[in-house]
Amino acid sequence: MVDVAPPSRAFVLGLADREGHLDGAALYELGESIGFTDTTIRLTVRRLVEAGLIESSGRGRSSTLQLTPAGVQERAPDLGWTALAYRLDSTAPPWDGRWHLVAFEIPEAERAGRDALRAHLIDLFGAPLGGGLYVSARDWEPWIDELVTIHEIGRYVTTIVTDRLRVAGETGARSIAASLWPVDEVGVGARGFVSTWEPLVSDPPPGLGDAARAAFSASLEFEALARRDPLLPRELEPPDWAGRAARRVYRDLLDALGSAHDAIANANVFAAFVAAVDETSSMTDGEFGQWLWRSTRPRSAVRG
């Protein structure tokens, strides 16, 4: 049993639902079961308010909390990419063999746009090829076009799609992927995740405190792993890719802990994850593509 309480900051942010709402009574009740005192929760909420991540109405257990846009963004990776990961494990169509490249040379006067684009390319699981050149194995042009429009840097950006790519003399698609993305490192982390958490799937902790600590600890570890997983098409994954096993174990663990403890099943950080995966599992490819776009498009571009 891994008995590690989550950081109070991650705990508070993680309980908010997909719209950023958080009920004070539920926050204090579950926090108490994990081992947080009311004072710890209250101070954490105050710091989050001061940091501009939460707005609070009322006091203590009678309070109502709302994450600000900055708080929603910091809370966790977009559920859209999480849903995509699970879809890649099951119903995703075959890879079309095409590489998508972005090249840019943006002057210092447009530094904000340049930095935003570079960060966004990494967030979209792109890999640097050197200088201002990045590559992905998936169609990322809509996301890039949106960000380029926001920052008005289109004249500095070129997009390319090709089915022929040579990297350091290598032309094999799987070998190229292994050289560009940390698949070996992520695989080691995924196997460690499975080893740690799979035993709890069949034997969940009976007490709510232990179960909640397990759920949040697994969530934090899974989140860190997901941030490094390049979400490659199956055709580019290493044989026996451990990322799929880690995703299966995490979902099974939440099901097991939620079945044993309603407070965990109802905690928004877990309920939103389960809902996103379940909601998208039966979608057609077209429906999922639209859903993914709505869920992950650059936030500053969403209007109205």
Image: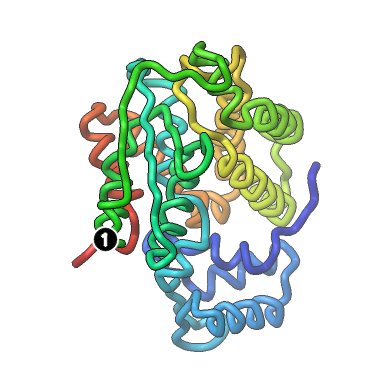
| Image quarter of residue 163 | top left
User: In the rendering, at what x and y percent does residue 290 appear?
Assistant: 23, 40
Residue at the outermost left position: 304
Q: Measuring 43% from the left and 42% from the top, which residue is drawn there?
A: 124
Residue at the outermost bottom position: 58
Foreground residue among 23 and 111: 111
| Image quarter of residue 137 | top left
Specify the amino acid type for callout 1: Glu
Give the quarter of the figure containing the N terminus: top right
Q: Measuring 60% from the left and 24% from the top, which residue is drawn there?
A: 179
Foreground residue among 93 and 298: 298
Q: Please state if 244 lies on the left or on the right of 57 as rendered.
A: right
Q: Please state if 209 lies on the left or on the right of 183 as rendered.
A: right
| Image quarter of residue 40 | bottom right
As displayed, is residue 112 above or below residue 154? below
- The colour scheme is rainbow
User: In the rendering, at what x and y percent does residue 70 appear?
Assistant: 45, 69
User: Considering the numbered disc 1 on the image, is that residue within a helix, a strand or a loop?
Assistant: loop
User: In the rendering, at what x and y percent does residue 262 appear?
Assistant: 54, 51
Give the quarter of the figure containing the C terminus: bottom left
Q: Measuring 73% from the left and 75% from the top, which residue is drawn there?
A: 37
Foreground residue among 255 and 131: 131
Circle count? 1
As displayed, is residue 213 above or below residue 244? below
Q: Measuring 59% from the left and 16% from the top, which residue is drawn there?
A: 238
As displayed, is residue 183 above or below residue 211? above
User: In the rendering, at what x and y percent does residue 285 appear?
Assistant: 26, 27
Badge 1 local density, few (<14 within 10 Å), some, or many (20+)? few
| Residue holding disc 1 | 152
